[in-house]
Amino acid sequence: MTLLDVEGFSVAEIADFTKWSVSKVKVRAHRARAHLRKVLRRLL
């Protein structure tokens, strides 16, 4: 999520860096955002 949302790398670039598939990068980012939402809701 950091590489995608903070650093501004594309999904394709992250897939290349990590040797993951593009779909795995998308799934991991989606799950990370969902987890962050859940944690923030508890705090607010």
Image: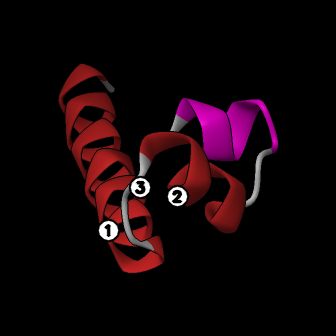
- Give left or right: position of 24 versus 2: left
Q: CA distance from mark 3 to mark 2?
A: 12 Å
Residue 35 belongs to the span the image colors magenta: no
- Looking at numbered disc 3 in the image, what kind of residue is underneath it? Ala
Give the CA separation, mark 2 to mark 1. Answer: 8 Å
Stretch in magenta? 2-8
Q: Residue furthest top?
A: 43
Mark 3–mark 2 CB contact (< 8 Å): no
Looking at the rendering, which quadrant does residue 11 occupy?
A: bottom right
Residue beneath label 2, please? 15
Amino acid type indicated by mark 1: Lys
Secondary structure, magenta segment, majority class: helix
Q: Quadrant of the C terminus?
A: top left
Q: Amino acid at mark 2?
A: Ala
Q: Position of residue 23 (x, y in %)?
A: 38, 79
Q: Residue at x 45, y 43 (%)?
A: 18
In terms of depth relative to the viewer, which is nearer, 42 or 21? 21
Residue extending furthest toward the right: 8
Left or right side of 25 for 2: right
Disc 3 or disc 1, which is closer to the eye?
Answer: 1
Q: Give the SS element for disc 3.
A: helix
- Residue ID for mark 3: 29
The answer for how far apart the CA atoms under marks 3 and 1 are is 9 Å
Q: CB of mark 2 within 8 Å of CB of mark 1?
A: yes
Describe residue 5's horizontal placement relative to residue 37 as left or right: right
